[in-house]
Amino acid sequence: MKRRFLFLFLIGASLFAQTTPSVFYVVTAVDSIGRESAFSNEVNVLIPQGKGVLLTWNASTSTVSGYVVYRSLTMGTGYVKIGTTSATVLTFTDTAPNAPSGLVGSPK
């Protein structure tokens, strides 16, 4: 399964303090029998406490049934599934990006 994702971020803050934590995201595409693709490119975001992140990506070039969004507080490892979308929904809002794990977002 091919994977091509473009990430864009809208963050509800304009200035970041040096102590703002980094949060890392990847997305996978899921085919009709539930197989997930490899992770997309990893994206690093600096997010102040109490702010959310809107993730968007391009549709897979393969036929997919949906997408899975993962977050980590450690670059390159420790990803936790935070949500899913259908094949036609190419955005996801992480409402608690500083949380270490759990389903906390919503498809938009």
Image: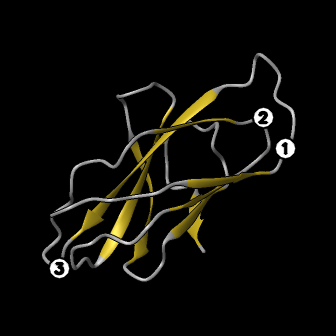
Instruction: Using a 10 Å C-alpha cutoff, classify the residue at mark 2 as few (fewer than 14 neighbours), some (14 to 19) or many (20 or more).
Output: many
In the image, is 93 to the left or to the right of 1? right
- Residue drawn 78% across and 36% down? 49
Residue 51: % across, % down: 77, 46
- Marks 2 and 3, the one that precedes in the sequence: 3
* Residue 21, label in figure: none
Element type at mark 2: loop
Tell whether label 3 touches label 1 (CB within 8 Å): no
**Left or right of 66, for residue 55:** right
Residue holding disc 1: 13
Does the CB distance between marks 1 and 2 fall below 8 Å?
Answer: yes
Count of numbered badges drawn on the protein: 3
Q: Between marks 1 and 2, how big is the CA–CA gap?
A: 7 Å
Give the SS element for disc 1: loop
Q: CA distance from mark 2 to mark 3?
A: 37 Å
Mark 3: which secondary structure? loop
Three-letter residue code for mark 2: Pro
User: What residue is pinned by disc 2?
Assistant: 48
**In x, y percent, where is residue 52?**
72, 51
Closer to the camera in the image, 54 or 99 = 54
Indicate the quadrant where residue 84 lies: bottom left
Which is in the foreground here, disc 1 or disc 3?
A: 1
The scheme the figure's colours follow is secondary structure
Q: Residue furthest top?
A: 18
Q: Identify the mark nearer the N-term, 1 or 2.
A: 1
Residue lying at 71% horizontally and 36% vertically, measured from the top left: 47
Q: Residues within 10 Å of mark 3 (few under 14, many from 20)?
A: few
Please provide percent x and percent y for residue 65: 28, 79
Q: Amino acid at mark 3?
A: Ser
The numbered dot on residue 32 is 3
